[in-house]
Amino acid sequence: MVEPELARRIKVAQLPKNLESAALYAVSGGGKRVRPALALLCCEAVGGSWNDAMGAAIAVEYIHCFSLVHDDLPCIDNDDLRRGKPTLHIHTNEAMAVLAGDLLLPLAMQQISQGSLSPDLETQLCQTLSKATVDMVGGQVYDTLGGLPEHFDDLKGLESIHRNKTGSLIHGACKMGALCGNASVDQLQAIDTFGHSIGLMFQIVDDLIDLHSPTHHVGKATGKDAAAGKTTYPGVLGVEKSKETIEKLKKQAETALEPLGNAGKTLQTFNVWMACRTR
């Protein structure tokens, strides 16, 4: 359901053809679609339908794709491979990659405001996505350019980077889905805790993938974190302690979903996959 919608909503935006082509390249042709899947599944888990959360799901994936396009630029991570194909600035040029990334940010907000949602829900969704995006950018600054508070030790600083750089948008996707499903206070609390746990867990798994998995399997360059001198969980805690932390966070997420009963079973399964994935 998500894949064709990512493209369709760009095609109806009446863009210059070269910009449309670049935006379609940025959002198509691969990716796990974890964030939109979480938005849909969290909506379902609190009693909503996938259709209720589709606008939110597309919005959060546009933000994710925008962040990848800009992260890959030579001035940041300087990557030439993403999802098994050349990054957008290699496929086109740096200027177009910057502009295509710029485009996806307002397009994301349009997906929330162009539907049939109530003004109150639109406001909640826009605020949630905006905060998640601001936190994500802040985390990327910490990760790439530094600036963490001086009193943070290595582990606290690392957790702050991961919870912001990766965890914020994952948590935001979960919360947006729950809001679209008209979650009760208790349901929203369950999804909130679940989202915080898996957001950190997801990036620790990424740290291990970067350390152990080959480029051809992952679809992007691996082994770059250590080469760039970035702080990672395996680097701070070691591999085994990192795996223990993943298991602890997986169990926290499982426990958080218990109040949802059978409605949370699909999310439980998705949680296991996120902890065990290899790409």
Image: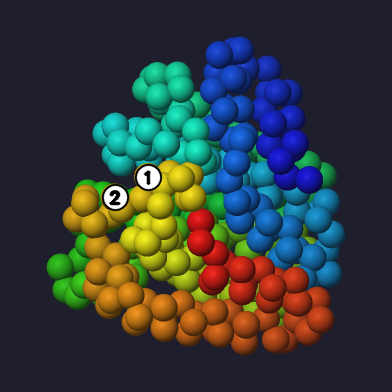
Would you say 119 lies left or right of 195 here? right
Would you say 155 lies left or right of 244 here? left
Q: Nearer the viewer, residue 89 or 58?
A: 89
How many tags in the picture? 2
Q: Check disc 1 and report the residue beneath it.
A: 221
**Mark 1: few/some/many CA within 10 Å (<14, 14-19, 20+):** some
**Residue 264 appears in the rendering:** yes
Q: Nearer the viewer, residue 137 or 267?
A: 267
**Mark 2: few/some/many CA within 10 Å (<14, 14-19, 20+):** few
Q: Amino acid at mark 1?
A: Ala
Q: Helix or strand or loop: what does disc 1 sit on?
A: loop
Q: Are marks 2 and 1 in contact (CB under 8 Å)?
A: yes
Quadrant of the rendered image containing residue 107 = top right
Q: Residue furthest top?
A: 17
Residue at 29% in and 65% down:
232
**Residue 184 appears in the rendering:** no
Q: Amino acid at mark 2?
A: Lys
Q: Nearer the viewer, residue 31 or 63?
A: 31
Quadrant of the rendered image containing residue 235 = bottom left
Would you say 40 lies left or right of 65 here? right
Q: Is residue 191 above or below residue 244?
A: above
Tag shown at residue 224: 2
C-alpha span from label 2 to label 1: 7 Å
Residue 66 % position (x, y): 49, 38
